[in-house]
Amino acid sequence: MIADEGPLDWDTSAAADAYRDRDMRLAEELIFPAVLERLGGGSGADRLALDVGCGTGAVAARLAGTGQWAVQALDPSADMLDIARTDRPHPRVSYRLFDGRTLDWLADDSVDAAVCCLVYCTDPDDGRLAALTAEIRRVLRPGAPYLLADLNPEATGVAFSTLRRGEPDTVYTDGDSVATLLRLRDGTTMTGATCYRSLDRYRSFLTEAGFPSPEVELPTLAHDGPTDEAPAEARTAPYMILTTYA
């Protein structure tokens, strides 16, 4: 049973500190390997990847650690970036504050890959996300991959081991604010709100920016025992991973 410590505004230094202590096991098992696999191959640390909305730097550090990428890790939260620089410094990662909308310091066709993990669900502003998606498309080289990982819109109300988004038997529509609990490493939770969007809305962000319609993966945990004894994350995908190319 996850103990609830009460609501927390995710856009504060207190939220950044709590986010530092979140239980990342599901993301580490279901999102991180897919990102590394899809961006694997090739060689040379001079290849540039963007980690858009890097938070505390977990994905950026993993990418840089492969030795195949130089990473620009971007976030609109100075508090998150302070934690990332402290907890995950890396000679091939440069952390940068940005406005969540523009990448105006980057030239057209100058980036070799981009990832954006668990970011769109935190921003209720469709206009800002549309502008950001168009900017990512602009800076990517032709054929470069864009991986967008986010909460699975078909998994609302499911109590996973490290998160629960929304209430069971509740129908959400695009733009709805959904109460979301994230487990911390000490067993308590931080509570905030995410913005619900359907898979079709995610597709439209990408296609309206000029990307092809994405490949969609819904990863679940492997489980060898009886189905009725499987954890929720072995039966339902907590996350979705969308892959498209410039």
Image (tube, helix red, strand yellow):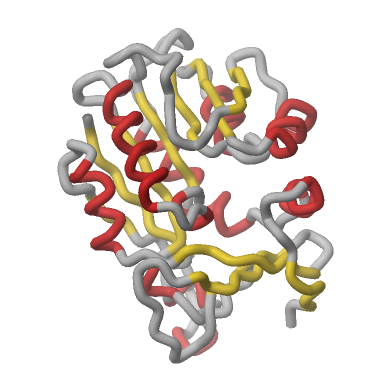
198 lies above or below 53: below
Q: Which residue is found at the position 48% from the left and 45% from the top?
A: 117
**Quadrant of the drawing holding the C terminus:** top left
How many numbered discs sit on the rendered protein?
0
Q: Is residue 134 left or right of residue 26?
A: left
Asked if residue 85 lies left or right of residue 196, the reply is: right
**Looking at the image, which residue is at 19% across and 45% down?**
207
Give whichever of 154, 77 is nearer the camera: 77
Whole-percent x, y for residue 161 in the image: 63, 72
Residue 199, picture quadrant = bottom left
- The residue located at (52%, 24%) in the rendering is 66
Q: Residue at x 37, y 73 (%)?
A: 154
The one nearer the camera, 167 or 232, is 167
- Above or below for 108 versus 66: above
Q: Quadrant of the N terminus?
A: bottom right
In percent of width and height, residue 158 lies at: 51, 80
Left or right position of 7 against 67: right
Q: Is residue 82 above or below residue 238?
A: above
Is 147 above or below relative to 96? below
Q: Position of residue 211 (x, y in %)?
A: 20, 38
* Residue 45 picture location, percent across and down: 48, 11
